[in-house]
Amino acid sequence: MTGNVRVNALNDPLRPRNAARSRAIAAVVTDKTLIPPSPTEDDYVRQVATAQAPELLSETDPFALFSEWLAEALKKEPNDGNAMALATVDETGLPDVRMVLLKDVDPQGFVFYGNLESAKGRELAANPKAALLFHWKSLRRQVRVRGTVTPTTDAEADAYFATRARPAQLGAWASEQSRTLPDRLALEKRIAEVGLRFGLGKVPRPPHWSGFRVAPQSFEFWRDRPFRLHERLVFERAAEADGWTTRRLFP
């Protein structure tokens, strides 16, 4: 019929390509080798032979233990031993999680930096509580942290921002983090504009970029043990001024 174009599905030139792609996707979805099988008893026996670390019985300071584990992770992890999963919740209570980098830790808490107008920034402003997870595969260990979140001081944020590479500083100004980006070129254009704005001079910290400190109310130290009989040691306190209580958990 004039003015109308009808494509017979059987003669569609894209059909073979789409069909092949669908078959490839289906093969991946049904490929049971993607998920590793459960360890065999022999695997566990070999693991027993290498599991020589003493039990976590005498620890009293979670920050000291964390610092010890982090130091080992920074030596052994192939990439970003200071990476941590940051969990927050949105306005509906739906959990949100992403990887960020730990930039400081002391008895006051765990510090990371980012855009205050990003999803995590908005969520923490509305509900200043968070959970952190460090997972160090090379050490077969993980640490969970839960606590309240407060902003770092401007002086702390300024000092850290000054250590960042200049392109990263420009990116902090250019990126409307978590907003829709039409294409990569739009971001590169904004970075170029910011670069022209500051020229060769110092790049100050943007007002929408700062730091967050998670003050722990609880730690859980987890260490892999054979036959899934893992060690779990919990430190808890009701308030920051309180002392820590400890308890062990069944694996």
Image (spheres, rainbow, N blue to C red):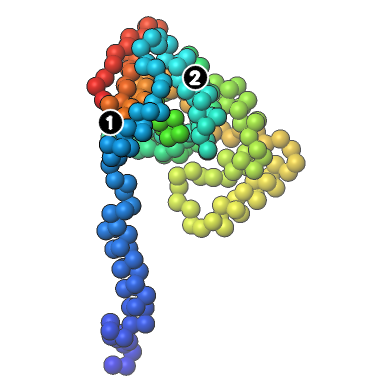
The reply to whether residue 183 is in sight is yes
Q: Which mark is first along the chain, 2 or 1?
A: 2
Give residue 27's position: percent from left, percent from top.
Answer: 30, 63
Q: What element carries label 1?
A: helix
Query: Which residue corresponds to mark 1?
Result: 227
**Mark closer to the observer (1, 2):** 1
User: Percent position (x, y) of residue 129?
Assistant: 36, 25
Which residue in the structure is indicated by mark 2? 68
Q: Is 142 in front, or is 187?
A: 142
SS category of the residue bearing label 2: helix
Give the number of callouts: 2
Is 247 on the left or on the right of 184, as rendered? left
Looking at the rendering, which quadrant does residue 207 occupy?
top right
Q: How far apart are marks 1 and 2 (CA)?
A: 26 Å
Q: Looking at the rendering, in which quadrant would you find the C terminus? A: top left
Kindly identify the residue that appears in the image at 51 percent across and 16 percent down. Answer: 106
Q: In front: 130, or 236?
A: 236
Q: Count residues near mark 1 (Cα–Cα under 10 Å), then give few for <14, some for 14-19, many for 20+.
A: some
User: How busy is the neighbourhood of tag 2: few (under 14 within 10 Å), some, or many (20 plus)?
Assistant: few
Residue ranking furthest to the bottom: 2
Q: Residue at x 68, y 46 (%)?
A: 195
Which amino acid, by three-letter code, is at mark 1?
A: Phe
> Which residue, as the protein is rendered here, is positioned at the far left?
250
